[in-house]
Image (tube, rainbow, N blue to C red):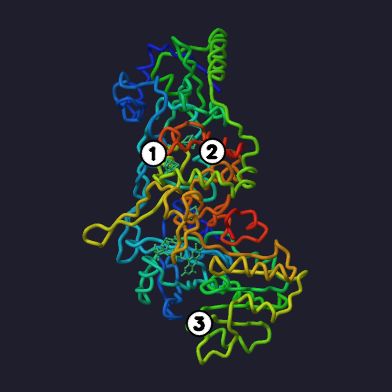
Amino acid sequence: MTAIQESAQRDIEANPYRPWPARITSITDLTDKEKLFELRLIDEDVREAFQFESGQFVELSIFGVGEAPVSISSAPSKQGFIELCIREAGDVTGAMHRKKCGDVVGLRGPYGRGFPFTEMKGHDVLLVAGGLGIAPLKSLINHIHDDRHEFGKVTILYGAKSPAEVLFRYQFDMWQHRDDFDLILTVDQPDETWTGETGLVTRLFDKIDVDPANTYGAICGPPVMYKYVIEEMRKKDMDVDRIYVSFERRMKCGVGKCGHCGVGHQYTCVDGPVFNYWEAMNLQGAI
Amino acid sequence: MFFRVIDKARLPDLVKGLATEYEVIAPIAKGEQFVYAAVTDPADMRLDYDTTLLPPKRFFFPSEETLMRFRVADNEVLDDEVYAAPRVLFGLHPCDINALLLMDNVFSGKYEDPYYLRRREQTLLIGISCTPSETCFCNVWDTNEVHWGFDVFLTDLGDRYFASCRTVKGAEILDRFVENRQVTDQDTTDFQSVVHGFKNSFKRVADTTQLPVLLDAKFDSPIWDEFGDRCLSCGACSMVCPTCYCFDVEDRLEPDQKSGVRVRTWDSCQFKEFAAVAHGQNFRESRASRVKYRYYHKQWGYLSKFERVLCVGCGRCARACPAGITPENVIAALQTGEVR
Ligand SMILES: Cc1cc2nc3c(=O)[nH]c(=O)nc-3n(C[C@H](O)[C@H](O)[C@H](O)COP(=O)(O)OP(=O)(O)OC[C@H]3O[C@@H](n4cnc5c(N)ncnc54)[C@H](O)[C@@H]3O)c2cc1C
Ligand code: SF4
Ligand code: SF4
Ligand code: FES
């Protein structure tokens, strides 16, 4: 760290609840309910000090409305900007959806424990996303993409309700034709244009080969999904401590103080949101 | 540690002296009960109090506080200074000092909470020995003794106080504000007999053997449904608890909608919305799951991080609960499977 970064770090640490102004530099409509926002922290030193891992999240702050935890969707290798994929679900996310390019919002973070990227290197990776769960996994996917030669086989299974709800479709449509990523999309309710798979994401496990001794799993999706996907991974003999899950819980502070995100004996915000399955099995009520 | 003896008749001098430089907070009577409040006249203090309605946590972590003032237009923070005036908390019992030590663990660490910590730095703590009340069970957690976290601790020896000074500040205020003398062998002997008498005066016992294991092994036990059926989700247990720290944060706009304040308020895991997330999902929907969570976190969650249970046996929640749910009942139910 440079001296300037250190001094920015001190400013940030002086008050962990203080959000830092960030400008919205681009907005992309993904579906009816989700938009992708690109943001840039305005203070150069704060921006430099903001170093994150895939799987971590920020607290998005809109003064007068409140705060919401949001996963970072872009890869750490993308410097200076971060992307947030946000579904309109209430006050803060709704206010964010009404923002225009150039508007300023607040960010604090990055928070939490992300995916073990370094540990995953040299192995096959099986990523399973359901719905909005693709948001944090997108960061991991892009990060792997940037370091593709460091990984073995990379398989992505992604399920959405309907074709209209498939996120990042423009990118995934292109990726369908790549041979360095095995990407399978599925929807519960296909329409006449849909040519991909149909049904729940768990059904896709019949179509893939997994080398259990050499594979890391990463799962993110709606709460009901975890149990079934983990079952499929276990059927493929994957190790409990190589299956990683990312949890969503109610959060207020993001820094282990407010108590809202408690899961079992841990706090999702500081001990997670990414846990391996062994840890998750030891968290009462987690899955 | 450094020790002094103060004649009981001289104690008001200490309070008066402190009041010239600090706001002095001490227990006073309120109807049949006791509360912590600002005092100017030492005669108002009731150092013979059993316990206070609310714990002293609110002097560090108020039930409502402004974190920052903001401007809406450019999402800027206008002011996030922590305004903490120098204070003395006079007459804290060992349980309440121990409770602050447990709170310190939460509000410090990797992310330091400037609001709590600044007030902590600005506040002197003067502890005092006590007599166990009907609901006290600090003996169960060994929180009937306190060894640090205070500036001065006064042990009542009848006609005089045995004063233990933990900090430089503590020693300094004694020397500046009250006549005191060195400790004699007789003082130490009397101190020993008082603290032994105190230790032997506890009536309550609780079998805390392997509680963390029981909490997991009996996670699905019907005892939780029984407690859940009784609980009213009023949150009183959390509000009166010196170790409950959960909070909520909300923004409040000025009438002109241009600026506002971000405020944090006490919250409770017993409230229904506490663990609710978007799209109608609630991770602790049932009252049973919420009552269980409060104990699970106190006896295991916190312990897993800081090697102490998050309870000091002050008995306030037992007094406050309209449904008669007490830590002792819960612990006994975990051991025996029967709900009292
Ligand atoms: C680690 C993590 C990562 C997340 N990543 C994303 C993401 O990448 N994209 C995305 O769109 N959403 C994400 N979320 C969910 C997002 O935080 C919630 O949708 C958002 O907080 C709702 O806030 P709101 O003000 O818009 O809604 P509100 O108006 O506050 O409430 C609507 C509903 O959301 C619930 N809720 C309120 N506050 C929270 C909270 N802090 N956390 C969870 N639920 C809450 C309420 O119970 C209510 O039922 C993530 C959540 C977590 C915990
Ligand atoms: S749980 Fe009850 S007895 Fe224990 S510290 Fe809190 S209020 Fe006191
Ligand atoms: S005080 Fe008693 S009734 Fe009220 S929330 Fe706590 S346990 Fe439930
Ligand atoms: S979000 Fe506050 S403790 Fe985790």
Q: What chain does badge 3 belong to?
A: A
Q: What separation in Å lies between label 3 and label 2 (alpha carbons)? A: 49 Å
Q: Nearer the viewer, residue B340 or B190?
A: B340
Q: What separation in Å lies between label 3 and label 1 (alpha carbons)? A: 51 Å
Q: Nearer the viewer, residue B119 or A211?
A: A211
Q: Which amino acid does label 2 sit on?
A: Val
Q: Nearer the viewer, residue A161 or B24?
A: A161
Tag 1 and tag 2, C-beta contact below 8 Å: no
For label 3, the residue is A162
Q: Position of residue A188 (x, y in %)?
A: 54, 80
Q: Circle 1 — which element?
A: helix
Same chain shared by disc 3 and disc 1: no
Query: Which residue corresponds to the image point at 73% horizontal and 78% vertical from the top-left?
Result: A209
- How many other residues sit within 10 Å of disc 1, few (<14), some (14-19) or many (≥20)? some
Picture layout, residue A163 above or below residue A89: below
For label 2, the residue is B339
